[in-house]
Amino acid sequence: MNDDEIPQFAKFAMDNDLSVRFIEYMPVGATDLWDKDKCVSVDEMLEVLKNVGKIEKLGNEDNGPAEYYRFEGRKGKVGLISPISNHFCSCCNKLRLTADGRLRKCLFSDDEVDLRKILRSNDCGIEKKIGDALLEAVSSKPEKLNLDKLGEVVFKRTMSQIGG
């Protein structure tokens, strides 16, 4: 949809010593609109960047899902995230906290923990309850996506409702 803007974003990041990340189009939210043919793979993004200038791979700098690159001799970085073409569930370290206080362990799951309810309770040991909820979320993250089902599953929230 807007993959023609990749070079401009990358150049802006490089010129201003910033980091920008691009993620492959994912079927989150209105999955009836999702079409795999609209997905621009990380490999395609990399080819676009190579046409802008010589790039060097920096690798995975923050133990997250992005592989980072920069144009040779520049300080800014571009991170590429590949949930569709090369899913990374087994090493994903991301959790999301929604604006309404729910902890989400995976973008491809509607499974959420209501942290707001815990925080608003008058129970003793609230820190332990929050800690337990975080540990449960981390320990139950999926190891693998069922990519065959992409586009068939209907998620309750869109990316903007999740915080993406």
Image (spheres, rainbow, N blue to C red):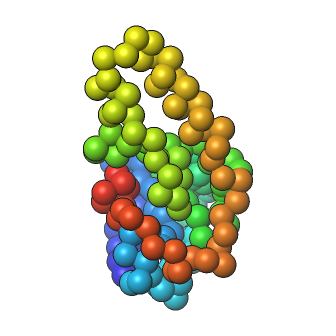
The residue closer to the viewer here, 1 or 141, is: 141
**Horizontal arrangement in the rendering, residue 92 relative to residue 18 (left or right):** right
The quadrant in which the N terminus is found is bottom left
Which one is nearer the viewer's eye here, 121 or 10? 121
Q: Reply above or below: 79 against 36.
A: above
Q: How many marks?
A: 0
- For the C terminus, the quadrant is bottom left
Q: Position of residue 85 (x, y in %)?
A: 64, 72
| Relative height, residue 141 to residue 119 (above, below) | below
Position of residue 24 measured from the top left corner of the image (x, y, whole percent): 51, 69
Q: Residue at x 41, y 54 (%)?
A: 20
Relative side of 9 to 55, left or right: left
Can residue 17 be seen at all in this image of the molecule?
no
Give the image location of residue 88, x and y in percent: 66, 57
Q: Is residue 117 above or below residue 144?
A: above
The x, y position of residue 12, in whole percent, is 33, 58
Residue that extends furthest to the top in the rendered view of this protein: 124
Look at 28% across and 26% down and name the residue there.
Answer: 120
Between residues 31 and 68, which one lies in front from this camera angle?
31
106 left or right of 31?
right
Q: Note whether 12 is above or below 5 in the view shown.
A: above
Q: Name the image quarter holding residue 97.
A: top left
**Residue in view at x 55 percent, y 26 percent:** 132
Let me know if residue 27 appears in the view: yes
Residue drawn at 30 percent across, 59 percent down? 160
